[in-house]
């Protein structure tokens, strides 16, 4: 059995088996998500589900690392990923219990990203569409930290409906996995398979109606891992594809975050102030049920993921056309549902 299938299965089984225990733990320790005006759920729900995702991912990756012959430089990066990923989970846990201020959380995310960089996992160069290298040199570290913190927060921000973040992260992980397989990067394939397995196993308990939320413990961990794994992939391939793939695969949360920043800026609201203008709120306002909204967003994510996989197979010209087409379609859709305006309508839920 190939390592990546084993990694996926171990992660899937562990997440599935361990999450009921996490629900029990959250209940006993008071890690509950209370309903409020901005949230969609009506009763308190356990919210440290990310612990199950984290445990499943670690179990799968450590098992593969234990019996596979991994080259030293790659092993070094993988250890960095596991160490920094553990830090981000601890930060998320504290946040899920204590509700940290946004600034404190940001400092913690930057610190965890710096730990990963210290293990030599960084974006040293990008290539332009014509295949020329752009070496980042002294910008490598700030660009890498910005990338990791940015992707970590996009997954965190989309975690607003049952099963949404877990499903979108699964789709993104599968997308990066498919590209890694095309390029022959087994390490990236194993890591993304483990991530997909752990998020997918958790989804059983998290899909609407959710019995548990992943909380910041889970959403920041998934975002952080997707960002880190894609850098490990980028080190191996000269193509910017390694970084374009996660951007497209996570296109939905990235665009949702970008739209939120534009919307808050235009409305004169602080950028970090939560609002009810996110894509999933708009879909609920349009009369979608939670399930319908989430499934629609899965489909959009899957289409974006497929376009990312297609990019690796086609010529530069066609690749540019795909990206332009995807961006145009998204902007048109966003304008149609009024995502650029502050949402003042009260919810009827």
Image: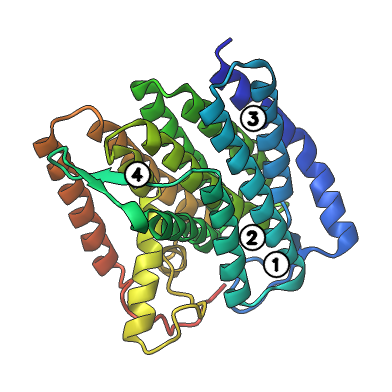
**Which residue matches tag 3?**
61
Badge 1 density bin: few <14, some 14–19, many ≥20, Cα 10 Å: some
Q: Pointer 2: what residue? A: 216
Q: State whether residue 136 is above or below residue 284.
A: above
Image quadrant in which you'd find residue 331? bottom left
Do callouts 1 and 2 mark residues in contact (Cβ within 8 Å)? yes
Asked if the residue at tag 3 contacts the one at tag 4, i.e. Cβ–Cβ closer than 8 Å, the answer is no
* Residue 305 vertical position relative to residue 331 in the rendered view, above or below: above
Between 54 and 339, the one nearer to me in the picture:
54
Of callouts 1 and 2, which one flags the residue occurring earlier in the amino acid sequence? 1
Q: Which residue is mark 1?
A: 95
Q: Are marks 1 and 3 in contact (CB under 8 Å)?
A: no
| Sooner in the amino-acid sequence: mark 2 or mark 4 | 2
Which is nearer the eye, 43 or 132? Answer: 132
Asked whether 81 or 46 is in front, the reply is: 81
Mark 4 vs 3, N-terminal side = 3
Q: Residue at x 43, y 42 (%)?
A: 231
Which label sits in the foreground, 1 or 3? 3
- Compared across the picture, whether 180 is left or right of 159 comes to left
């Amino acid at each position: 059995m190939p390592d990546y299938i084993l990694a996926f299965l171990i992660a899937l089984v562990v997440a599935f088996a361990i999450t009921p225990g996490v629900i029990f733990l959250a209940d006993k320790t008071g890690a509950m998500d209370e309903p409020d005006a901005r949230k969609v759920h009506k009763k308190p729900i356990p919210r440290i589900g990310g612990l199950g995702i984290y445990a499943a991912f670690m179990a799968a990756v450590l098992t593969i690392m234990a019996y596979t012959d991994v080259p030293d430089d790659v092993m070094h990066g993988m250890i960095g990923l596991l160490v920094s990923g553990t830090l981000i989970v601890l930060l998320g846990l504290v946040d899920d219990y204590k509700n940290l201020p946004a600034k404190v959380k940001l400092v913690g995310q930057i610190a965890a990203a710096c730990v990963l960089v210290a293990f030599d996992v960084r974006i040293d160069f990008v290539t332009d569409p014509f295949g020329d290298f752009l070496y980042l040199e002294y910008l490598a570290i700030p660009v890498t930290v910005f990338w990791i913190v940015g992707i970590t927060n996009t997954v965190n921000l989309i975690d607003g409906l049952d099963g949404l973040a877990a499903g979108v992260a699964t789709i993104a992980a599968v997308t990066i996995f498919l590209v890694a397989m095309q390029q022959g990067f087994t390490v990236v394939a194993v890591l993304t398979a483990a991530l997909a397995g752990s998020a997918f196993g958790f989804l059983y308990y998290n899909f609407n109606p959710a019995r548990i939320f992943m909380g910041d413990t889970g959403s920041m961990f998934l975002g952080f891992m997707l960002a880190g794994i894609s850098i490990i992939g980028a080190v191996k391939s000269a193509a910017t594809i390694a970084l374009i793939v996660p951007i497209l695969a996570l296109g939905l949360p990235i665009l949702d975050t970008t739209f939120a920043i534009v919307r808050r800026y235009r409305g004169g609201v602080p950028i970090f102030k939560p609002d009810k203008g996110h894509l999933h709120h708009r879909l609920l306002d349009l009369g979608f049920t939670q399930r319908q909204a989430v499934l629609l967003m899965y489909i959009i994510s899957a289409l974006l993921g497929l376009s990312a996989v297609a990019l690796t197979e086609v010529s530069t010209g066609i690749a540019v056309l795909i990206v332009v087409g995807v961006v145009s379609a998204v902007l048109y859709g966003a304008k149609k549902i009024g995502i650029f305006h502050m949402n003042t309508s009260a919810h009827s839920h």
